[in-house]
């Protein structure tokens, strides 16, 4: 099960990571993908994956980001009981604290 959001934020992934890790409750890491470029990743519980990708930057404008949220449903992965509602609550709280602009749901991609 997956869903995604798009938003705009003034600062870099590194700055976002620092703030998210200060605030908790989840641990965020920087990653790099040949396909998606730099991203933040988080595994809050065994069956949940969250990634944030940066999609571009124009001087003087906020950076464009997207987030992929996924609850893995596979026999080899232990179910934590996490739900979209509980994950979105924590994630939206983090985004609102930054604060982000233009938050909207988009089509999930991978």
Image (cartoon, rainbow, N blue to C red):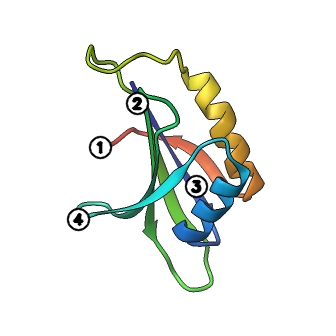
Q: Give the spatial CA distance, label 4 vs label 1.
A: 13 Å
Say which residue label 4 marks: 34
Say which residue label 2 marks: 2
Q: Give the spatial CA distance, label 2 vs label 4.
A: 22 Å
Frontmost of labels 3 and 1 is 1
Q: Are marks 1 and 2 in contact (CB under 8 Å)?
A: yes
- Assign a secondary structure to mark 2: strand
Which of disc 1 and disc 3 is earlier in sequence? Answer: 3
Q: Identify the image quadrant of residue 8.
A: bottom right
| Viewer-proximal residue among 41 and 61 | 41
Which of disc 3 and disc 4 is earlier in sequence? Answer: 3
Say which residue label 1 marks: 110
| Viewer-proximal residue among 68 and 31 | 31
Q: Residue at x 66, y 41 (%)?
A: 25
Which of disc 4 and disc 2 is earlier in sequence? Answer: 2
Q: Give the spatial CA distance, label 1 vs label 2.
A: 9 Å
User: Can you give x and y, in whole percent of width and height, for residue 87 in the image?
Assistant: 59, 30
Identity of the residue furthest to the bottom in this view: 59
- Assign a secondary structure to mark 4: loop
Q: Residue at x 61, y 77 (%)?
A: 61
Q: Residue at x 63, y 49 (%)?
A: 103
Q: Give the spatial CA distance, label 4 vs label 3.
A: 22 Å
Q: Are marks 3 and 1 in contact (CB under 8 Å)?
A: no
Frontmost of labels 3 and 2 is 2
Which of disc 2 and disc 1 is earlier in sequence? Answer: 2
Q: Which mark is residue 7?
A: 3
């Amino acid at each position: 099960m997956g869903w995604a959001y798009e938003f705009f934020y003034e600062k870099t992934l590194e700055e976002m990571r620092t703030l998210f890790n200060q605030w908790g409750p989840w641990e965020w890491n920087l990653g790099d993908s040949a396909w998606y470029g730099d991203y933040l990743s988080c595994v809050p519980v065994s069956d949940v994956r969250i990634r944030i990708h940066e999609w571009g930057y124009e001087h003087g404008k906020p950076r464009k980001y997207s987030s992929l949220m996924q609850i893995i449903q596979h026999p080899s992965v232990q179910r934590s009981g996490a739900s979209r509602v509980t994950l979105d609550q924590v994630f939206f709280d983090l985004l609102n604290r930054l604060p982000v602009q233009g938050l909207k749901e988009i089509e999930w991609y991978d």
